[in-house]
Amino acid sequence: MAPRDEDEGIECEIIESYGIFSEGVKDWNKEVNLVSWNGRPAKIDIRSWQKNHERCGKGIALTRDEAGELVKLLTKILDSRPRKETRGSAPTAKARPRPPQTLEPFYNELKLPFASGPDECKAARNALLKKYHPDKNAANAAFATRKTIRIKEAYDAVMTWWRESGFLTL
């Protein structure tokens, strides 16, 4: 099938269809195809198409080398940041980086298993601060103050590592 845009005189031929990565509304899908534009050598093409391929939206056509570089960039982005869920998406498991062993004493201070994630650290910090806050331990205020400071320092050390690792963004 050779869709043609009458206004611009652009012809294209879909040589091979690789797949749909997003189904849209009103019979439009985002697709990856091998497309020849105006009789030129075929390129990897990413754009929205009507389901019948009679019309297409704006997109990008890449050589194999350009597509390879794009894959490297996307892999770097996806490997370094947690995936945020969007409405209607299923949660995905993202492998977390493993903290260095030097953080183990801080995890112990927070009473957490080593390598617990940022959410667990925050919850543990909050629970421990409630338990050991000097206002709740007036009989032993000096101990409670020291304990509170150690909890805050442990939390800061662990969270700093998570931020610097690129896993946690603020």
Image (spheres, rainbow, N blue to C red):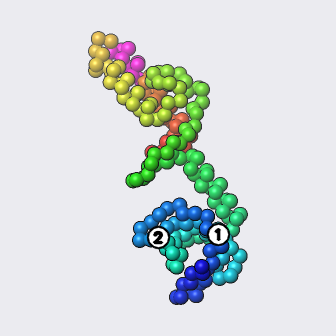
Place of residue 62 in the rendered image (x, y in percent of width and height, measured from the top left): 65, 68
Q: Is residue 98 left or right of residue 68?
A: left
Q: Is residue 91 left or right of residue 35?
A: left
Highlighted range, magenta: 141-149
Q: Position of residue 108 (x, y in %)?
A: 49, 21
> In the image, is residue 3 above or below residue 80?
below
Residue 91, located in which quarter of the rendered image?
top left
Q: Quadrant of the N terminus?
A: bottom right
Q: Amino acid at mark 1?
A: Glu
CB-based contact (under 8 Å), mark 2 and mark 1? no
The answer to whether residue 56 of the structure is visible from this angle is no
The rendered magenta stretch, by its main secondary structure, is classed as: helix
> Few, some or many C-alpha atoms within 10 Å of disc 2 (few <14, some 14-19, many ≥20)?
some
Q: Disc 1 on helix, strand or loop?
A: strand
Residue that label 1 marks = 16
Q: Which residue is mark 2?
A: 28
